Image (cartoon, rainbow, N blue to C red):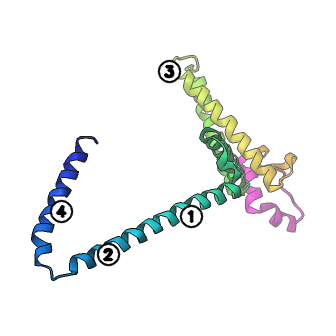
Amino acid sequence: MEKVTPMLESGFITIKTKAEEKLFLQLPEGTTANIQAKLDTAKENVASAVGNLDSLACEGLDQLTTKLPALKEATPELLETAKDTTVTYAEYAKEYVASYSLAQIALKLGDKGLQVVTDALKLAGLEESKHVKPVLTGIKTIRRHARAVRRAGAKAAGIEPAKTIGEASLLGAVAEIVGLNFFLSVVGLQLVP
C-alpha cells in the first residue's frame, strides 16, 4: 500500500498540471472560476450526502439491534443460536414429512431392506470381519434413527401406538394405506395390522 500511494499521487499531480497547462489556457475568461465554484459545491454536496448516509447507517443499525436483540450477542454465540434453531426446525420438518403414510411405508421398507442386509452378512459369518464390522455398526445406527423418525411421524399423524403401520406387517401396512379395511368392512370383514 505504501509503494502504490506515491505512484498514484505523482500520477494525479502530473495529470493535473498537464490539464492546467493545456486545457485551462484554451478556456474562455471566467470559466475556471465557474468550474472551481461548481467543484466546491459538488464537494459540499458529497460531504453532506456521506454524512447523511453515515448517520442513517448508524441509526439503522441501532434500530436493527433494538428490534433483534440477538444481534448484540457475540458472533460465536449468535452462530450457535442460529445453528440450534436451524436444527430444531429441521427436526420439525423431518417429523412432518414422516407423518405421511407414504413416508411411513418408505421408512418401513428401508428398515426391512437394511435388516435383510444385516441378516445376510451375519449368515455369511462376516459380522466379525474388520472391514464389515463398521458397516454393520453404521447400518444399526441408521435403522435406529429411521425407527425413531418413523415413530415420531406416526405420533405427529395421530396414529395410535398399538396400531401403527410400523408395528404391522408390510402387507398390513400397505392394506392400511390403500384402505383395504374400508372395502372389507362392507362385507363385514376386517384385516388386523
**Which residue is denoted by mark 3 in the rendering?**
131
Structural distance between the alpha carbons of marks 2 and 3: 83 Å
Disc 2 residue type (three-letter)? Ala
Of marks 4 and 2, which one's residue comes earlier in the chain? 4
Q: x, y percentage for residue 91?
A: 69, 47
Q: Nearer the viewer, residue 69 or 23?
A: 23
Residue 44 locus on image (x, y percent)? 41, 69
Q: Earlier in the sequence, mark 4 or mark 3?
A: 4
Q: Earlier in the sequence, mark 2 or mark 1?
A: 2
Q: Which structural element holds mark 2?
A: helix
- Any magenta on residue 153? no
What secondary structure is the magenta-colored segment mainly? helix
Q: CA distance from mark 4 to mark 2?
A: 17 Å
Residues shaded magenta: 168-191
Residue under pointer 2: 37
Which mark identifies residue 56? 1
Q: Amino acid at mark 3?
A: His
Q: Between disc 3 and disc 1, whose residue precedes?
A: 1
Q: CA distance from mark 2 to mark 1?
A: 28 Å
State which quarter of the image contains the N terminus: top left
Q: Position of residue 36 (x, y in %)?
A: 28, 73
| Sequence-earlier tag: 2 or 3 | 2
Q: Is residue 26 above or below residue 160?
A: below
The disc at residue 16 is 4
Q: Nearer the viewer, mark 2 or mark 1?
A: 2
C-alpha gap between disc 4 and disc 1: 35 Å
